[in-house]
Amino acid sequence: MYLVKNPAAYQAAQKELDAVIGRGPVTVEHMSKLPYITACLRETLRLQPTAPAFSTKPLANTTDWPVYLGKDKYEIMPGQVLLAVLPAIHRDPAVYGDDAEAFRPERMLNEHFDKLPKNSWKVRRYFDSKPRFELMRSHYFSHSAME
């Protein structure tokens, strides 16, 4: 959906696919050679995360109560559950800029992605390891090719 609505991004993705894959089938070996496609996947997951939220709470062995977050703005008590709403976190203008609502894969390319604050992109937590991310991309491409 995002690529169709963004002709420049679509053309950049198509150019990369043509250069790396050509007319042959997509293979796992291609995955590391598709940085723009990787950025498109990251940006799509930023705007439309597969899990809309996750919950967490302070560690059970915490002894200093209350726990404060956000420069002491939020007081957390024992057993209190926190809900992180990913679409809100992933659209923070302080992290992603004034165009945080826009699909812009360039913000997720290589060094730009690496400069993001540690916890700004929660999907990263699950796909940091290369094998899992490669598997996810392979799965995406193999199912996209069948449609």
Image (cartoon, rainbow, N blue to C red):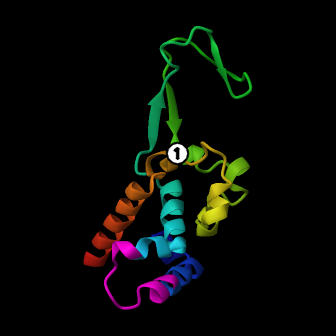
Q: Give the labeled residue for mark 1.
A: 122
- Residue 59 location in percent, x, y? 50, 19
Q: Secondary structure at mark 1?
A: loop
**Which residue is drawn at the image coordinates 44% and 47% (left, top)?**
126
- Residue 61 location in percent, x, y? 50, 12
**Quick check: 141 left or right of 104?**
left
Asked whether 97 or 13 is in front, the reply is 13
* Quarter of the rendering containing residue 31: bottom left
**Which residue is drawn at the image coordinates 40% and 51% (left, top)?**
50
Is residue 25 inside the magenta stretch?
yes
Give the quadrant of the C terminus. Answer: bottom left
Q: At label 1, which amino acid type do we have?
A: Lys
**Quick check: 122 left or right of 64?**
left
* Range drawn in magenta: 16-29
**Which residue is drawn at the image coordinates 45% and 52% (left, top)?**
129
* Quarter of the rendering containing residue 131: bottom left
